[in-house]
Amino acid sequence: MEWKEVTSFFVVFLCRFILFLFIIVLSLVILGIPNVNTCFLTVFMAFIIPLPPNSILVDPIHCMLSKFSQALRAYTAYAVVLTEVQRVTFITIPHYLLSGRLESILRYFVNHIRLMMRVLAHLRVWTTWLMYRLFPVRLIRFLRKASGMFFVFGIAALCAPGLEPLPNLLLTGHLYPGSLIRFQRCAKYEDSTACHSSFLEFSYTVWNLTRTGLFVVMCWTLDCHAWIPPRRDFTSIVERCLALHNKTYSQLLLCATGLPLLMNGHCLSQTVHNILCTASLLLFMVTLNGYHSRTALMTYCALCCVAMNVQSLLVAVFNIYRNLQTQKNGYMATLLYIMQLYLMFLVIMDSCTRVMSKVKNPKQDILGEDG
C-alpha cells in the first residue's frame, strides 16, 4: 500500500504539472507573455481542475510495471542461458575437440593419406609397365616431358604472388585481396554480389591451401630425389611447429582463433580463414624442411612464399587502417588489432628468415627452436 500511495502521489503531481504547462502555453499563445498574477491563477487552475479517480491512472501504471518486471526477469534468465550456451559452444566444446578429438581425427586422415599414397605408388608402377607395353617408348617419353612441363608451369602460375585477386575480379568485379590473418569485418555486399560472398570470403584461403598442396605433390613427384618425407611422428611435428620462435606461432593461432569471435561485427569465417592459412604456412615450412639439396622449383616456391608473406603484411596493415577510419572501434578493439598485427609481423619475419636460410643452406634444419 505504501508503494501504491507513493505512485499515486507522483502520478497526480505529474498530471497537475502537465496541466499547468498546458495552461501556460495556451495563455501565452492567446494573451501573450504572462505576468505574476496570471501565473498564480494558472497554478490555482492547475490544482483546482478535477482529475479522474486515482485508480484509473494508477492501476494501468502498476500493471505496466508488473509486466515490465516480468519481462526484465525473463530477459535476465534468457541472457544467463545464452551466456551459458555461448560458453559451452565457444569454450567447452572447442576445448574438448582440440584436447583429444582433433588429434585422433588428424591421425585418422593422415594414416589414410599415407595408405593412399602407397596405393598410388603401386598403381604408378603398374601403369608405367602397361604404358611401355602398349605405346612406343618415344611417345611415352615425349608425353612425360610434356606433362612435366605443364605441371611445372601450372605450379609456377599458382605459386606466383599477387595473382589470387584476379579470379575475384573476373567473377565478382571485386579484387578483395587476402592476408595471412584477416582483420576486416564481414563485408556487407550489394545485392548484385551477395551470391558471391562465400567465394570472396574463402578465395584466398582456398588459393593458399592449393598452393601448399601442389608444393607437397611436387616434392613427392618431381623433386623426390632432393626431398625426404618427415620421419617424425605427427604429434611431435605439431609440437615442434607450435614451439617455434618462443611459441609465437601458437600465440598467433590462439589470437587469430579467438579474437574474431570476441569482437563485435566479426564472423566465424574469419576464424576459419585464420586457422587454415596459419596451418598452411606451417605445412609449407615442414615440407620445405625435407629438402637436402637445392632445386629450381624449391627455390622458386620459397621466394614466392616470401613475397606472399610481404604482400600479406601490407594488406593486413591497409585493412587495419581502413577499419579504424571507417568503423567506430573502441580503445580495446584498437589494442587487440595492434597485438594481433604484432604477432603476425613476428611470424612473417621469422618464417621468411627460415625459408631464406633453407634456400641458402638446404641441409639446415629450419624447424629448430633457434631457427
Image (cartoon, rainbow, N blue to C red):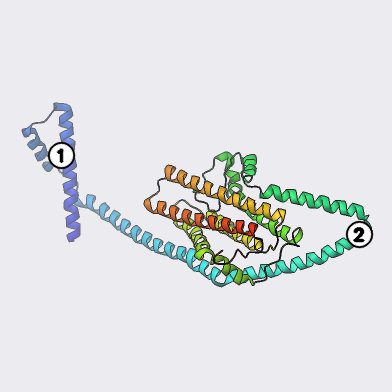
Residue behind mark 1:
20
Horizontal and vertical percent position of residue 146: 82, 50
As helix, strand or loop, the secondary structure at mark 1 comes to helix
Is the residue marked by circle 1 packed among few (<14), some (14-19), or many (20+) residues within 10 Å? Answer: some
- Image-based side of 146 in relation to 35, left or right: right
- Image-based side of 160 in relation to 136, left or right: left
Which image quarter holds the C terminus? bottom right
Is the residue marked by circle 2 packed among few (<14), some (14-19), or many (20+) residues within 10 Å? Answer: some
Answer with the quarter of the image where residue 212 lies: bottom right
Answer with the quarter of the image where residue 48 lies: top left
Residue 53 visible in the shown view: no
- Outermost residue toward the front? 361
Residue behind mark 2:
132
Residue 234 visible in the shown view: yes
Horizontal and vertical percent position of residue 246: 50, 65
Q: Which mark is residue 323?
A: none
Foreground: 258 or 211? 211
- Image-based side of 84 in relation to 198, left or right: left
Q: Earlier in the sequence, mark 1 or mark 2?
A: 1
Spatial CA span between label 1 and label 2: 108 Å
Horizontal and vertical percent position of residue 172: 61, 41
What residue type is disc 2 on?
Tyr
- Outermost residue toward the left? 37
Is 16 rendered above or below residue 77? above
As helix, strand or loop, the secondary structure at mark 2 comes to helix
What residue type is disc 1 on?
Phe
Is 242 rendered above or below residue 307? below
Is 37 rendered above or below residue 217? above
Foreground: 60 or 214? 214
Identify the residue at horizontal 49%, vertical 68% (top origin).
Answer: 92
Horizontal and vertical percent position of residue 338: 44, 53
> Which mark is in front, 1 or 2?
2
